[in-house]
């Protein structure tokens, strides 16, 4: 799959409630906002970049990528970010990563794309093994942009769960060896842990 066929979307539209309501993507990690780490890591893996954010839009726009707020009100979760991305995506594929996981694999997109093509799937998601359990990482997700109508209908019906929507499509999980690559900072304590 050519890299130019894939648009990357940084998901930074959450409430940050577990971090005291701060805008997570703008929290500093090693002197740089978390969302900027995600942009710099995803940039070489895709043809174009976008950010999904609902606050401080100017600060995100200053990072150099188009910024799109949720199309749905009241911070309904990652699917609203997926939808905002799909609505503005001009390539056949969209890949999403959250703003709070700065060390995700540098070959994330390449591996998701290879698996999606090999399996003839609509959606490919990252997965890891943690404490002997398979752990799906649903916000690390490569999808066909043709799924937009399906997601519009799903969210219009009031549903918000990623796994319920992806279950309607041919979805595959791609195993990654290093669960630490997917460590995310949901709380200030986790952000401090990340700094170490």
Image (cartoon, rainbow, N blue to C red):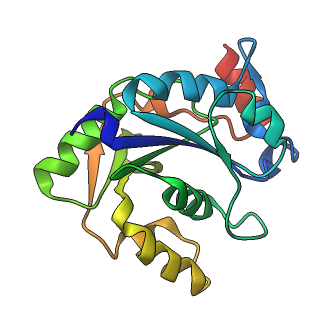
Residue 70 shown left or right of residue 136 in the figure: right
The quarter of the picture where the C terminus appears is top right
- What percent of the width, then of the height, locates residue 69? 71, 55
- What percent of the width, then of the height, locates residue 29? 71, 19
Residue 143, above or below 20 = below
Tell me what residue is drawn at x 47 percent, y 29 percent: 42
Residue 161, above or below 40 = below
Residue 162, above or below 16 = below
The quarter of the picture where the N terminus appears is top left
Q: Which residue lies furthest to the bottom in this view?
A: 157
Tell me what residue is drawn at x 75 percent, y 28 percent: 62
Q: In which quarter of the image is residue 100?
A: top right
- What percent of the width, then of the height, locates residue 102? 57, 26
Residue 36 is at least partly visible in this image: yes
Tell me what residue is drawn at x 67 percent, y 34 percent: 185
Residue 102 is at least partly visible in this image: no
Tell me what residue is drawn at x 38 percent, y 68 percent: 147
Is 75 in front, or is 53?
53
- What percent of the width, then of the height, locates residue 99? 63, 37
What number of labels is visible?
0
Q: Which residue lies furthest to the left in this view?
A: 118
Is 116 in front, or is 194?
116
Q: In which quarter of the image is residue 109?
A: top left
Is 40 in front, or is 135?
40
Residue 89 shown left or right of residue 159 in the figure: left
């Amino acid at each position: 799959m050519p890299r130019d066929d894939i648009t990357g979307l940084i998901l930074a539209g959450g409430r940050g409630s577990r971090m005291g309501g701060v805008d997570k993507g703008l929290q500093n990690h090693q002197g740089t906002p978390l969302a900027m780490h995600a942009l710099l890591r995803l940039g070489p893996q895709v043809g174009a970049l976008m950010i999904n954010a609902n606050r401080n839009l100017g600060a995100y726009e200053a990072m150099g990528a188009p910024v799109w707020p949720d199309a749905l009100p009241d911070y309904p979760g990652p699917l609203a970010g997926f939808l905002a991305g799909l609505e503005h995506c001009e390539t056949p594929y969209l890949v999403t990563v959250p703003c709070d996981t700065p060390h995700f694999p540098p070959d994330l997109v390449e591996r998701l794309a290879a698996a999606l093509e090999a399996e003839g799937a609509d959606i490919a998601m990252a997965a890891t093994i943690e404490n002997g359990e398979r752990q799906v990482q649903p916000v690390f997700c490569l999808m066909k942009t043709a799924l937009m109508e399906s997601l519009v209908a799903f969210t219009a019906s009031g549903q918000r769960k990623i796994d319920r929507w992806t279950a309607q499509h041919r979805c595959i999980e791609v195993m990654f060896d290093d669960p630490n690559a997917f460590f995310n900072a949901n709380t200030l304590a986790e952000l401090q842990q990340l700094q170490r």
